[in-house]
Image (tube, grey):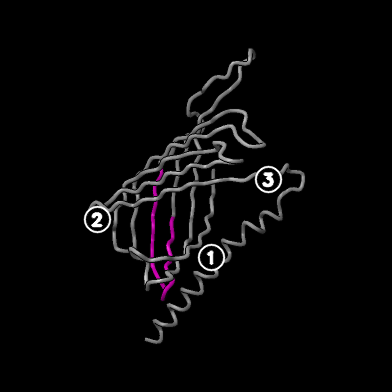
Amino acid sequence: MKSTHKMKNKAFLLNIKFLLILIFLPVLFGFSQSTDREVVTQPTEWFVLNSNVKLHKKFGFTFDGQLRFVQEFENAQHFLRNGLDIYLTPKLSIVPIGYMYVWNFQYGKQPSAFVNNEQRIWQQILYRHNYKKLFFSHRFRMEERFVQKHHTETDGTINNDGYDTYLNRIRYRLQVQIPLNKEKIEPGAWFIGVFDELFYSW
């Protein structure tokens, strides 16, 4: 019994250390960036709707929609993402296939040369566990990205080359939630959530 308790304590401390590394790593990278980069400050507004609809004890539907704006609601990026959720165990679920469409805009103080929208196919593994009142979730997501490409002709005409740029990206997100008015995250529970996410593209 003592051995199990020690193992749980070690796992908890490991999760906390990992979370702190994820939170402070971007700060360190920020300080190491080149000083000759042009930096602008502009307000951003994000509106997010996440929904997981359980259709059966073994499968469901996941949906994510976001509207992103800058500088007093100037369109920046909007997207819709959906996929099939399969629940392998109460703690482990996978999305074997999902689809996402991204609308990009020329916006802000550093607008892009072209409006390149994007289509994505994605897969996901989600593992949840708890330690006392802390609820952890580990999300691994793989994305196959098909980004629109444009070019300008000599007469100034802009041509759409289609979704001609193919990119891959893998993501890992660690999230911790702490319920405030109940013992666990359940309907009617108020909670505080913190998360950080790492991205690797090629």
Q: Viewer-proximal residue, 130 or 180?
A: 180
Q: Closer to us: mark 1 or mark 3?
A: 3
**Residue 75's spot in the image, x, y percent?**
54, 36
112, above or below 44, in the image: above
**Residue 184's spot in the image, x, y percent?**
37, 70
**Residue 110's spot in the image, x, y percent?**
66, 36
Residue of label 1: 19
- Tell me if mark 1 has few (under 14), some (14-19) or many (20+) residues whose alpha carbon lies within 10 angstroms of its own: many
Check disc 2 and give the amino acid type. Answer: Lys
Q: What segment carries the magenta color?
A: 122-139
Question: Disc 2 and disc 1: Cα gap in Å?
Answer: 30 Å
Q: Closer to us: mark 2 or mark 3?
A: 3
Residue 1 figure quarter: bottom left
2 and 3 marks in contact (CB < 8 Å): no
Residue of label 3: 41
Check disc 3 and give the amino acid type. Answer: Thr
Task: Residue at 42%, 69% (x, y): give it.
Answer: 179
Residue 42 figure quarter: top right
Tell me the element at label 2: loop
Predominant SS of the magenta segment: strand
Task: Residue at 44%, 60% (x, y): give it.
Answer: 138
Task: Residue at 58%, 61% (x, y): give it.
Answer: 23
Could you tell which of marks 1 and 3 lies nearer the N-terminus? 1
Check disc 1 and give the amino acid type. Answer: Leu
Residue of label 2: 58
Task: Residue at 51%, 74% (x, y): give it.
Answer: 13
